[in-house]
Amino acid sequence: MGLREAASCFVIFLLSVSVVQAADGWGVRCTPTQICAVKGSKVQIRCSYWHPSRIDDLDVAVEQTYWFTKGQDSEPVDLRAASEYTGRVQYHCGNKACTLTITDLRDSDSDVYQFRFITNQQTGSFTDSPGVSLSVTGVQVISKKASACKTYDCSWSRVECQTSCPPTPSLSYIWYKNGQKTWGEKSYSDFFYSADSISCAVRGHEDFPSAPVCVHGNSCDRVNYIDRNICAFKGSSVDISCSYNSRYYSITSKFWFVAEQLYRPRAVDLLKDPEFTHRVQVLEPERGRSTLRIMNLRLSDSAQYRFTFKSQWSEWERSFPGTTLTVTDVQVIWSPIGPTLTCHSSCLLSGRPSFVWYKNGTEIHGETSPTFRGFLHPENSYSCAYELHHSSPVYAPKVPLVQLSQPGDILKGSSVSLTCSSDANPPPAYAWYKQNQTLLNRAAQLVFSSIPLSDSGEYYCTAENALGKTASKRVLINVKCAWKSAVTGTTTALLLVVILLAVFLWIRRNKSFTQQHFSCGTHTTSRAAR
């Protein structure tokens, strides 16, 4: 196992096997039973199970497997349907074994995890007990050895990066001296002056460093962020705070900035950043404490925010990880389990949050859980709200509209395209069919680069998402030969010429007759006068 792979897992197995076996041939074996892991890493729990092959002349078949936590309600909730685990949980099952993977571990993930499988028997379900205990921990710096320098206000010290988990070999560490990243092993040795501080993190999880500590003396340069992760809703406001200390009180400058990104290569004071104009404030509620307030949050504000300061004699470097802000909105996610709709947000609060569900914009009374298990009618729309933040509604596709690139008769060999569009959320998948139900294409557009006569016929498309499927009206494509079209055009043109010529001759003859009649009338009048 390489250093990076080891760091990505950072899991300690304290007990290797847990076996729960019933006398009648039902059982579960999980490994390990106790796990200690660092924040930000991932963990895997593997359970194998067995059951009788037949009961009462009926073959036993497993219909469902899932994990749940003891900390949840008495009714087990599949972790895949729990909002706080959305996007972080995966199951890999097969051959009577299932592996649970949880990524991006958080403090709140510390719990007891249990595995359950359900069969086609009336009483054919089994749950492992007592389950697998997971502890999520951080890191800290411990001073191991120090010796005084020959110069004043200095010491040569060795410090060590530790966690509450038992030691694990093959791990690599990151060190931050005065906020400046540097490399090292589990222990780090250097000269330390009274202004110097030191912090450490496991490589691969640099966003979760230990709190900076003074090595020589009690008053050193350091920054401590109140929260390492903050989640906030789009359109709301958020406060990001830190405490800071300078060995030298004469601080000449200080500001908040966004960690370096591809489009933001250097640190810019957020008060001067055009993207945050009129949306940020920096508050100093007390000495040694700074609060960055961001208002009218946008999804693009999701980033890591850091604080730096500079004094006459020292500077807090800018590579020390700060507070990661995640800006999100409320979403309704369809799950194949049930099937159900889940009201999801990365900003779920601890405790027992209450949700509100809506059908066609009207509140559904009694539905306060994060999952909606009612009947989903394809003609209805569904949405939810959490902490007064509303999701966009989800609904099945409306009847698709078909647009033909050139209506009317189509000449053989010409280029023709049909485009299918439908209003739906989530966005639908499209498919094209001909009149005999032959599937032609799975895309929004059906293109004929050189259409043959055999492609004449009626076409329609379907739009489908997790909530339903609808079909468009049929569109007729009439492909004609070019020579037939030319003959038809020539005949029409000749007929038009004959008609125009006949009209012209008739008008000319009529005009001649009129003139002749007028001349005779004039001549008679003259004679009479005479």
Image (cartoon, rainbow, N blue to C red):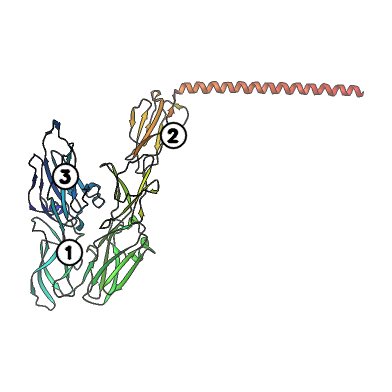
- Distance from disc 3 to disc 2, alpha carbons, whole Å, reads 55 Å
Q: Is residue 98 above or below residue 524?
A: below
Q: Which residue is at 13% across, 39% downward? A: 96
Which residue lies under the disc numbered 3? 116
- Name the amino acid type tagged 1: Ser
* x, y percent for residue 443: 34, 36
- Name the amino acid type tagged 3: Arg
Q: Which residue is at 48% across, 29% downward? A: 408
Q: Which residue is at 31% across, 43% downward? A: 374
Which image quarter is the C terminus in? top right
Of labels 1 and 2, the one closer to you? 1
In this rendered view, identify the residue nearer to me: 285 or 177. 285
Residue 210's tag is: 1
Q: Earlier in the sequence, mark 3 or mark 1?
A: 3
Label 1 packing within 10 angstroms: few (<14), some (14-19), many (20+): many
Does residue 269 appear anywhere in the picture? no
- Name the amino acid type tagged 2: Ser
Q: Is residue 425 above or below residue 250?
A: above
* x, y percent for residue 72: 21, 52
Which residue lies under the disc numbered 2? 405
